[in-house]
Amino acid sequence: MAAHVHSVNIGKPKAGLSKSLDSGIDKRPVDQISVLDPGPKGVGASGVEGDAVVDMRHHGGSTQAVYAVAREELDWWAVDLGRDLQPGAFGENLTTAAFDVDASVVGEQWRIGGSVVLQVTAPRVPCATFSKHMGVPGWVKAFTDRGRTGAYLSVVQAGVIRPGDEIQVEWRPGHGITVPEAFRAWMGDVELARQVVAAGAMPEPERSKLAAKLASWER
């Protein structure tokens, strides 16, 4: 079976998942989504029309316009947790099938359906809101240890995405740094962090933040 979109998902603001804010992490399947570049973080929210991003300081913006997770990864966690995980369970906008999101190279571009082009920008870093949403003790550590985070994407070419749309990798940069490697760099692997920074693998502002973290680790 060709790589394709299994589900497209959006969230509405939901109370009780953060100390001070509602959250749009609870996403549910819809018939289609329209994606576009929302603008810089703090100004733009989700790159998916109708999808809530409440905490615009930490989420949304051009480099986190869309979030993708493989259906197969949800299935792995469903077995591990002993419970069903529906599409959107991790707060993802795109649930893929027959496509290994976590094999993606940071910076590669996906064509979805006839017109949409998305670019892999960074791994997802788990937070307290994600943990509360999942309701699993020690969730942040478990998710970090697994290291298969799914991928944030920017919108290169806007359009409509529907379940069943084929996914093709149109272009892949030569540095070869995968999403899980970028995640390990972000979480403190100094050697990988050096490689990611040297390759310029992630866009701004993520690149500058990682470079600052690396400088602090090497003092």
Image: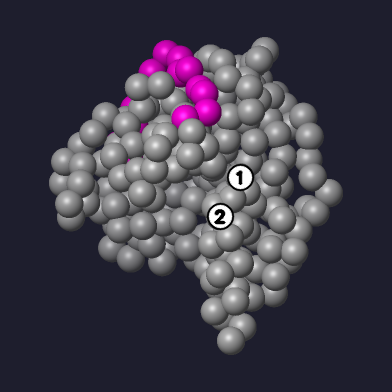
Residue 26 location in percent, x, y?
30, 37
Q: Is residue 97 left or right of residue 107?
A: left
Residue type at numbered disc 1? Thr
Q: Is residue 87 above or below residue 214?
A: above
Residue type at numbered disc 2? Glu
Q: Is residue 70 left or right of residue 53?
A: right
Return the residue nearer the eye: 179 or 64: 64
Quarter occupied by the C terminus: bottom right
Please tell me which residue is depicted at 42% across the width and 34% down the height of the picture: 44
Residue denoted by label 1: 121
Residue 35 location in percent, x, y?
50, 22
- Quarter of the image for residue 116 reads top right
Q: Are marks 2 and 1 in contact (CB under 8 Å)?
A: yes
Q: Which residues are magenta?
A: 25-38
Q: Is residue 55 above or below residue 145?
A: above
Mark nearer the N terminus (2 vs 1): 1
Residue denoted by label 2: 206
Please tell me which residue is depicted at 23% across the width and 34% down the height of the picture: 13
State the SS at label 1. Answer: strand
Residue 25 location in percent, x, y?
32, 40
